[in-house]
Image (tube, rainbow, N blue to C red):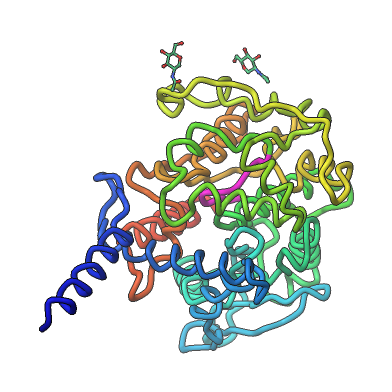
Amino acid sequence: MTLKGFFLLLSIGAFTAYYVYQPIPDQIEERWKLMLTDCFFRTLSHLADFSELTGMKDYMGVMMFITFAERVVPQSDENVHVSEERFDGVEVVVYQPKVLGGETELRRAVIYLHGGGWCLGSSRMGPYDLLARQMVIDLNSVVVSVEYRLAPEHHFPVPYEDVYRVVKHFLQMEVLAQYAVDPGRIAVSGDSAGGNLAAAVSQQLQQDPYQQVKLKVQALLYPVMQALDLNTPSYQQNQNMPILPRTLMVRFWSEYFTSDKNFFRAMMANTHNSPESAALLKFVNWSAFLPESYRGKYNYSAPSVTLRGTGSGPDTLSHSIADPRASPLLVPDADLQSLPKAYVLTCEYDVLRDDGVMYAERLRHAGVQVTHEHYTSGFHGALMFTMWPTDFMIGHTMMENLIRWLQQNL
Ligand SMILES: *[C@@H]1O[C@H](CO)[C@@H](O)[C@H](O)[C@H]1NC(C)=O
Ligand SMILES: *[C@@H]1O[C@H](CO)[C@@H](O)[C@H](O)[C@H]1NC(C)=O
């Protein structure tokens, strides 16, 4: 090898090591695997930025690669019958236990909402397909996995409304009968942005005076709960944590509402609150709702409030960020009291940790039965990592604990 070649190799090696190596807390297991996984996500994100900058394809359009790479065609097997259907116009994948003989026993049901920041993801991704099948087998339940429409093509409230329509459709007596579902044993669940949708739907359903069939439980897995304060201690502590750095979460939030980059910049600076949303800051006040152990060294300062509007209609935007269908943490205690029993999963190494912790605290305070499972070595998105080559033990543990809770409570 020539000296030049040697130096070239050396510099490529050094660059790669520098690029791949991200400080990851010792508490996290399988750190190298997470570093490599994160490296893939970061590279894709850089590509997406570049592509958007040069006008080739928008950022989320490139990030959708992850969704397509993990896409499967959900198929029936010896235990599970799978069908792709439409509930009130919205695509769903329905998983049902295969019945032997003339079984008539009514079953449980889980309505599942996938994550991906309202912009990415699909019910047809391998890990969601796996989770749905596991639930069918272990819970003898029907699983309805919802293919709601995504931002930025469909901004808020479209994704939320798609989910609400599916839930309203499914909770009709004649539809439940068709799937042999027990009306008293229905859950809604979702991870990340799906947890946000699950919490919002549970609240809105409770307020609907004509709704007869109720949800029995809600299982919120590292959910997104509020858009008002993007500087909670967990946002600060985990701002560069894989696989959801603060920039990406802020990007998801802003794209959920608008494609206006000014709004993204305001959210990054945590100066996006209007006088209208500022009136609700009391519901996300982490110096009041976050237990001291989570507050750590961070001192509370309320996000600043701006009167300045952004390009695409400041009124609509401030309405949206203050809307509990987008930020379910923004409701008074009276609206929490009658909510279904809850399971809340949070991870220490996650910008969204405090969103989930505060909701669990507020629910408990309002008298709702809550199981709060906090993973001290957990990182955001771990439930998506249950399949080769990104297969993490903690993802399997989370899945087992969730299903066990559903076995006992649904
Ligand atoms: C937040 O709570 C603290 C005390 O718990 C209080 O002093 C402060 O005024 C509150 N701020 C807001 C914006 O609600
Ligand atoms: C929080 O406030 C205390 C007391 O004023 C100060 O000593 C500490 O450095 C502050 N922490 C941070 C992270 O700014």
Q: Is residue 75 above or below residue 401?
A: below
Residue 283 shown in magenta: no
Residue 142 position in % (x across, y down): 60, 71
Magenta region: 218-227
Residue 250 position in % (x across, y down): 61, 48
Q: In this view, does 163 lie to the left or right of 382?
A: right
Which of the 4 image quadrants contains residue 369? top right
Residue 222 shown in magenta: yes
- Number of dots carrying numbers: 0
Q: In this view, does 243 lie to the left or right of 312?
A: left
Quarter that holds the N terminus: bottom left
Q: Residue at the location (84% across, 49% down)?
A: 311
Q: Nearer the viewer, residue 113 or 169?
A: 113
The overriding secondary structure of the stretch rendered in magenta is: loop
Residue 195 position in % (x across, y down): 60, 53
Q: Is residue 113 left or right of residue 24?
A: right
Inspect this view and state whether residue 366 appears: yes
Residue 277 position in % (x across, y down): 78, 33
Q: Residue at the location (58% across, 58% down)?
A: 190
Q: Name the quarter showing ligand 1.
A: top right
Q: Which of 64 and 5 is in front in this view?
A: 5
Q: Residue at the location (41% across, 41% down)?
A: 374
Quarter that holds the C terminus: bottom right
Q: Nearer the viewer, residue 101 or 74?
A: 74
Which of the 4 image quadrants contains residue 278? top right
Q: Is residue 103 above or below residue 272?
A: below
Q: Residue at the location (58% across, 73% down)?
A: 62
Inspect this view and state whether residue 180 appears: no
